[in-house]
Amino acid sequence: MVVAKKFVLARQCQGFPKESDFELVEEELPPLKENEYLAEAVYLSVDPYMRGYMPRVKLNTTMYGTQVAKIVESRSLKFPVGQYVLGPFGWRTHTVVPENGPTHIGMRTFLLPDLQGLPISLALGVLGMPGNTALFGLLELCQPKAGETVVVSGAAGAVGSHAGQIAKIKGCIVIGIAGSDEKGKWLTEELGFDYFINYKTQNVEEELRKAAPQGVDCYYDNVGGEITTTVLNQMNAFGRVALSGSISSYNSIGPFKVTTPNLTIVLQQLKLEGFIVTRWNHRWMEGIQQNLQWIQQGKLKYRETVTEGFENIFKAFTDMLEGVNVGKAIVKV
């Protein structure tokens, strides 16, 4: 008999998540049925979107999340023992999985592709959902052209750091907005960003005018809020905006108040489009292979912030929401 540990949502968060909002419980798993397998978590992902989706999680059910897991027992020919899977199993150590599932918010379960010797944890980052979010959101919605100026907010996170690098690959001038000078040094000295703005210590409006006196052509938005308002007000005619996330509002209580520059959007004829990356599920492996190729060519770099221990996943989650991590935040079981 296998006993799984899992974190369930004990109460809906009011504002910033508290440890008391979750409860660690144990669950005895049933024997496998035909066409099922047992997955043991190896790495778990913590991502900003989880906070936004928490109101959808039913009380006393497993918290949402994706993990890389090893198949340790199987009655499925399609999922043999010893292989690794990526699945939306949530915050749990062991999962009995049917061949055809599970899915959640469009995220599917599948065997890990060949990552050419790279760490399997990258399937939760640059070679997974965040990497594809950066690639498809930037290239399909912003459609940056060589010589254009691209601004990325949340630039030192898993998605933003990759979006900025892809813009550089396409020959753009890239400005990253993040919350510490340490992150800025990483962006400019290692990832090749042209400029960095520390939104906590600098005036974003003034610094953006200095970095982009010619205006902004594309904006990859991970944060929303007043930063987004500031960038929109400095965009050129026919600018394109990919709305990837809104981490500035995820922990708000009540309606989130922000000034939307409607007149600027109209007069500059801006195109703003929100998206969820599962829109491109039919091209998922295409995105992974492209990012893998760029890594192998030395054009795309990554960093992981790893928290050790399943029991520490809540801390990893809240650290990520507070911007403590650089690059992709993951938990090693």
Image (cartoon, rainbow, N blue to C red):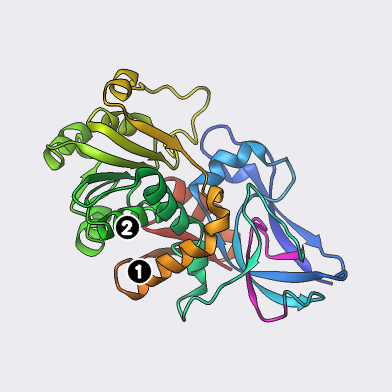
Q: Is residue 119 left or right of residue 139?
A: right
Q: Position of residue 190 (x, y in %)?
A: 24, 64
Q: Which residue is drawn at 53% across and 77% down?
A: 114
**Label 2 sits on what residue type?**
Ile
Residue located beneath label 1 in the image: 294
Residue 91 on the magenta segment: yes
Q: Mark 2 points at which residue?
A: 166
Residue 69 drawn above or below residue 236: below
Magenta stretch containing residue 267, yes or no?
A: no
Q: Give the range drawn in magenta.
A: 80-97
Circle 2/circle 1 CB separation < 8 Å: yes
* Separation (CA) of disc 2 from disc 1: 9 Å
Q: Nearer the viewer, residue 316 or 193?
A: 193
Pointer 2 local density, CA inside 10 Å: few below 14, some 14–19, many at least 20 = many
Report the quarter where the N terminus lies: bottom right
Label 2: element kind: helix
Residue pictured at 21% horizontal, 46% vertical:
148
Any part of residue 245 in sight:
yes
The relative height of residue 58 versus residue 170 in the rendered view (above or below) is above
